[in-house]
Amino acid sequence: RLEPVAAAALSSAARPAVDRAGLTLLRPSGTAGAGASPASTSPLRPDASGASSGGWRKWASEDAAGTEVGVGTVLRDRFLIEEVVGEGGMGLVFRARDRRREEASDRNPFVAIKVLGAEFKSHPDALIALQREARRMQQLSHPNIASVYDFDRDGPHVYLVMELLEGESLDRVLLRHANVGLPLEQARKVIESTGKALQHAHSRGLVHSDFK
């Protein structure tokens, strides 16, 4: 799946909507996402970035010594962190239980939470750009692109709420086939799914920043 700003790697049936470098992963054709529809989560908050870059800088400096997010943490009195599912240059990705979905008797209350690393707090303008790109990503609706539901912060913790995908990451699939390569049909599906996702994003003015 594709990601805003910092690029994402690809996944053949992405486990989390997460990879080492980015925010969202490619979903193969015919793979249903594990998350509920975007309507079941709050939209990107218009004030998530603060009123200005000065707002970012103010809270970033004040909250620099905040506590770490980990299993058992609850963000915004809503998202209960249950498991680490990925780690990359931008931060940690968690499987989380959405209490609002549970209250609504949603059969699948789980989401992926991408908590951005401390290095981003020293670059408030990057956070503003990230929120803007996340907002644009929210407008992309495609079976091969992981959904970004929300961008927010809780105290010192800046995070994205994304569709949680279950499966095996593409790098692990390739590792298992290191000596023989993927079967032709499986490789074709991955390539076609990736191409469709990129084509959809390009048609809406979004360019993947680290496709490899």
Image (tube, rainbow, N blue to C red):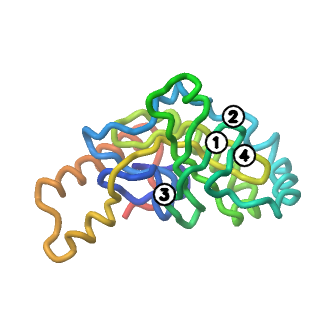
Q: Position of residue 173 (x, y in %)?
A: 27, 63
Judge from the rendering whether residue 33 lies leftward or rightward of residue 50; answer left or right. left
Q: Position of residue 109 (x, y in %)?
A: 50, 34
Q: Amino acid at mark 3?
A: Val
Q: Are marks 1 and 4 in contact (CB under 8 Å)?
A: no
Q: Earlier in the sequence, mark 2 or mark 3?
A: 2
CA–CA distance between discs 1 and 4? Answer: 7 Å
Could you tell me which residue is drawn at 45 percent across and 44 percent down? 164
Which class describes the residues within 10 Å of circle 3: few (<14), some (14-19), or many (20+)? some
Which class describes the residues within 10 Å of circle 2: few (<14), some (14-19), or many (20+)? some
Which class describes the residues within 10 Å of circle 4: few (<14), some (14-19), or many (20+)? some
Q: Amino acid at mark 2?
A: Arg
Q: Which residue is mark 2?
A: 45
Quarter of the view holding residue 89: bottom right
Q: Position of residue 64 (x, y in %)?
A: 82, 62
Q: Which residue is mark 4?
A: 153
Judge from the rendering whether residue 20 lies leftward or rightward of residue 43; answer left or right. left
